[in-house]
Image (cartoon, rainbow, N blue to C red):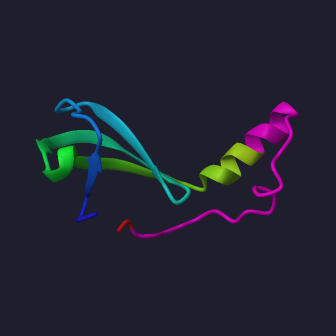
Amino acid sequence: MDGKTLRLEAPERISMSAPVSVEYSDAMFLGEVIGCQRGSGGVWELNIKVSQILTGLQSLCALRAQLLGENVPASVRGFSPVTGGTIN
């Protein structure tokens, strides 16, 4: 991540201006593709302009399950939301 640009590799080409979401370490990055070029090894190098970052996804899923009366996995119970992190 560099500023508001997320750089990552993908197995296939994604069109410019395509809306995307990327999940990483209990966060979801929402944005659009601003660059896509063929990299080495057959992967595509993407540049994504991030417009919003949502955190605490596991907590939200657990809350949703509780509200809908669904079973909540033990790994999610008592989870504290992530408020920051880095992408390598």
Which quadrant would residue 17 be assigned to in this image?
A: top left
Which quadrant would residue 32 be assigned to in this image?
A: top left
In the rendered image, which quarter contains the N terminus? bottom left
Q: Position of residue 70 (x, y in %)?
A: 85, 35
Residue numbers of the magenta segment = 63-86
Tell me if residue 17 comes above or below residue 81 in the rendering: above
Tell me if residue 83 comes above or below residue 52 in the rendering: below
- Relative side of 12 to 78, left or right: left
- Relative side of 61 to 71, left or right: left
Residue at point 14% right, 49% down?
39
Frontmost residue, 30 versus 71: 71
- Relative side of 80 to 14, left or right: right
Residue at point 75% right, 55% down?
76
Tell me if residue 48 comes above or below residue 13 in the rendering: below
Frontmost residue, 73 versus 55: 73
- Relative side of 2 to 72, left or right: left
Does the stretch in magenta take in 58? Answer: no
Q: Position of residue 88 (x, y in %)?
A: 35, 68
Residue at point 56% right, 56% down?
26
Residue at point 46% right, 70% down?
85
Q: Main secondary structure of the magenta part?
A: loop
